Image (cartoon, coloured by chain):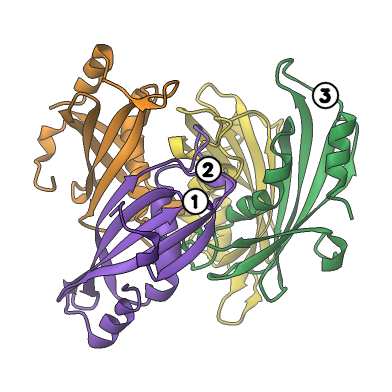
Chain colours: A purple, B yellow, C green, D orange
Amino acid sequence: MSDSAPGTFRYHRTVEVRFRDLDPMGHAHHSLALIYFDVAGRADLTSIDYILAEIVIRYHARTHFPDTLDVAIRATKVGGKSFELEYEVRSGTGELLISGKTVQVMYDYSASASKVIPDDIRERIATYEG
Amino acid sequence: MSDSAPGTFRYHRTVEVRFRDLDPMGHAHHSLALIYFDVAGRADLTSIDYILAEIVIRYHARTHFPDTLDVAIRATKVGGKSFELEYEVRSGTGELLISGKTVQVMYDYSASASKVIPDDIRERIATYEG
Amino acid sequence: MSDSAPGTFRYHRTVEVRFRDLDPMGHAHHSLALIYFDVAGRADLTSIDYILAEIVIRYHARTHFPDTLDVAIRATKVGGKSFELEYEVRSGTGELLISGKTVQVMYDYSASASKVIPDDIRERIATYEG
Amino acid sequence: MSDSAPGTFRYHRTVEVRFRDLDPMGHAHHSLALIYFDVAGRADLTSIDYILAEIVIRYHARTHFPDTLDVAIRATKVGGKSFELEYEVRSGTGELLISGKTVQVMYDYSASASKVIPDDIRERIATYEG
């Protein structure tokens, strides 16, 4: 995932590194990766009833402050009941800092069970595809 | 508030400083004060319909990692529609690190207006008094 | 401080509310106030050797997600050894959400004692004044 | 990794879920996984010069508040220049909530290059093994 060209992600958002993101080493704490991924995906996908099943994160370089990060996101696999999102976080100068993917499983909260991805959601997810 | 003897607070909880609480200076970021206060008050008071109106925080010494803090809390004023809580955060060795107070206003969410503190709540708040 | 007209603050920054800022009530947790204040002041003032002595925060309205906040800051008092900063956080529509002030004391870390504000720092602080 | 019996981890720590860990869904935000892992490993391993290269997290069940979590950690692979740590986070009742692993690469900050794990570090890591 680290070798994707920046151009292959159609969906991008920016996020400002905050002073509070830093840890005693002076770089963004590694847990911030998941908050930066969030920034990219949340506003459009929160209304979807999924649960987060798995996350993989790779750290390529330290995240500094201050900086305006570019967070790119795309849907790479849309299965029957689950879908995968892939992320790349780059510094203001374009350096790849963090990459990762998340696996989401559609979930019926009333039935407490996974469920098939409905067609309209399938379409909404597809807007993240390249 | 900084000159209160530790013994005057009847209600105490402990909270572990986390590595993630630290900022680049190597001490707990000052916003953690409000999370440490939270630790003391939340579990018992969250079901109360209040809004937080004002907070005062005084920093006496740096909060280090690792440490187990003592967070003390007491109700100092219980008015008609509002009540005040006072806090002291001490290090494992008893040094006063942070003190503060919060002013809460009872709130009727359905009417979007402040309201008089009901008697049962008044009693629950009183359990924090010295 | 809540009655200041927006125009009286010369120094403004914007900060994006993050999904992670929210608490179970669906609004930014009250500790975020200090992180939003930070956003405004840090980049220019971190190199100054001060310690944070006191903070006052007033909550006027809930902070929602998503939103782009305006954080305004000004120096209100510059004393011999300390200075005060005042903050206002407004929603994207201009509603006052949070106001506050912080009291900073100049500190000589090598001598472990407060110290007089040097002239060049005094000038840098003055850039925040209205 | 999710099928490990609890008994196979020799090293355990507890961490209190904080109110601030929660997100609008009322469960700990998924980024907290990395802070809970941290709690287990940091105090003993921070002085080791490594960089975090990769993280895998699996979410098995929601983390509730209040709760006292058990965080278990063990070293699963110790290679020439890198080592892997495995984690399990369980609720107070013993339910598996989160599992994961982190890959650390030894790093010589002065030379800006990865380096071979020294023998004393190799031993310290080994204390996490089952």
Q: Quadrant of the C terminus of chain D?
A: top left
The answer to whether residue A38 is left or right of residue C74 is left
Which is closer to the viewer, label 2 or label 1? 1
Please, what is the three-letter code of the amino acid marked with disc 3? Lys
Q: Label 1 amino acid? A: Ser
Vertical order, B27 against B124 (above or below): above
Q: CA distance from mark 3 to mark 1?
A: 38 Å
Q: Chain of mark 3?
A: C
> Can the viewer see residue A76?
yes
The chain containing the residue under callout 2 comes to A
Q: What residue is pinned by disc 2?
A: A64
* The N terminus of chain D sits in image quarter: top left
Q: Position of residue A15 (x, y in %)?
A: 52, 59
Q: Which residue is mark 1?
A: A91
Q: Residue at (73%, 30%) from the top-left corner?
A: C49
Quarter of the rendering containing residue B10: top right
Q: Chain of mark 1?
A: A
